[in-house]
């Protein structure tokens, strides 16, 4: 089983679509990564459910 998932999300700053690589082997993650387009810091809150479903929230630093 591949523990990595590539998804497309929208930057909370510029609204552009960005590619995000998620490690499914970690049930809950919270980290900061810069937008590939506008370079603003995005807070990622990622949860992997027991059934493997991903919940990904992208927040700007003011949220």
Image (spheres, helix red, strand yellow):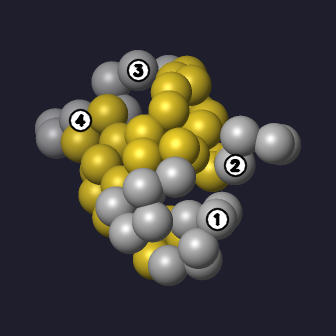
Residue 49: x %, y % from top left: 58, 34
Comes first in the chain, label 2 or label 3:
3
> Could you classify mark 4 by the number of other residues whose Cα lies within 10 Å: few (under 14), some (14-19), or many (20 or more)?
few
Q: Position of residue 21 (x, y in %)?
A: 30, 48
Q: Are dots 2 and 4 in contact, CB under 8 Å?
A: no
In front: mark 2 or mark 3? 2
State the residue at coordinates (66%, 63%).
Answer: 12
The residue beneath circle 3 is 26
Q: Quadrant of the N terminus?
A: top left
Crowding around mark 1 (Cα neighbors within 10 Å: few <14, some 14 to 19, many 20+) is some
Measured as percent of width and height from the top left, residue 37 is found at 38, 69
Label 1, label 2: how far apart the Cα atoms are? 7 Å
Q: Which residue is mark 1?
A: 13
Given contact means CB atoms under 8 Å apart, are the residues at marks 1 and 2 in contact?
Answer: yes
Q: Which residue is mark 2?
A: 60
Residue 11, quarter of picture: bottom right
- For mark 2, give the secondary structure: loop
Say which residue appears at 69% left-offset and 48% top-offset: 59
In the image, farthest residue toward the left: 1
Distance between the alpha carbons at the discs numbered 2 and 4? 26 Å
Determine the secondary structure under disc 1: loop
C-alpha separation, residue under disc 1 versus residue under disc 3: 26 Å
Residue 52 higher or lower than 39, as above or below: above
Dot 2: few (<14), some (14–19), or many (≥20) neighbours within 10 Å?
some
Seen in the image, is 34 located left or right of residue 29? left
The residue labelled by disc 4 is: 3
Nearer the N terminus, badge 1 or badge 3?
A: 1
Cα distance in 3D space between marks 2 and 3 = 22 Å
């Amino acid at each position: 089983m591949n523990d990595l998932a590539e998804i497309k999300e929208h930057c909370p700053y510029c609204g552009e679509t960005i590619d995000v690589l998620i490690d499914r082997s970690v049930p809950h993650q919270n980290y900061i990564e810069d937008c590939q387009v506008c370079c603003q810091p995005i807070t990622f809150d990622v949860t992997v459910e027991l059934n493997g479903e991903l919940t990904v929230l992208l927040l700007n630093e003011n949220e």
